[in-house]
Image (tube, rainbow, N blue to C red):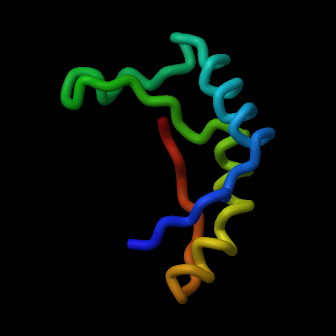
Amino acid sequence: MQRIDGVLDGEAWRRVHETIAAIRPDELDMGEAKGFGRFVARNRPYFSDLQRRLTPLVSERVGEFVEPSYNFL
């Protein structure tokens, strides 16, 4: 495992927190609540964009092509 510091700048972290705080209860997927005890928010636009922007860095670090698929909180 390799730790990479400084991947997200202050603005990116601000957007992460802002995006999470803006999720309304009616936007949560309750499908995993019973089996796993968690509420899930899938494929939020900001996180999809962030994932797309980080893909080249991840590919470089692991030494092979990676492709974003989905994301969830």
Above or below, 60 relative to 11: below
Q: Is residue 32 left or right of residue 60?
A: left
Above or below, 72 relative to 32: below
What is the x, y in percent for residue 7? Answer: 67, 58
Q: Residue at x 24, y 23 (%)?
A: 37
Residue located farthest toward the top when viewing the structure as drawn: 25
Res 15 quadrant in image: top right
Q: Nearer the viewer, residue 60 or 45?
A: 60
Q: How many marks?
A: 0
Q: Is residue 53 left or right of residue 59?
A: right
Q: Residue at x 67, y 63 (%)?
A: 54
Residue located farthest toward the left when viewing the structure as drawn: 35
Q: Is residue 62 left or right of residue 11?
A: left
What is the x, y in percent for residue 4? Answer: 56, 65
Q: Residue at x 48, y 66 (%)?
A: 3
Residue located farthest toward the front when viewing the structure as drawn: 5
Above or below, 20 relative to 2: above
What is the x, y in percent for residue 53? Answer: 74, 61
What is the x, y in percent for residue 33? Answer: 29, 22
Q: Nearer the viewer, residue 33 or 63?
A: 63
Q: Residue at x 52, y 11 (%)?
A: 25
| Quadrant in which the N terminus appears | bottom left
Above or below, 63 relative to 25: below
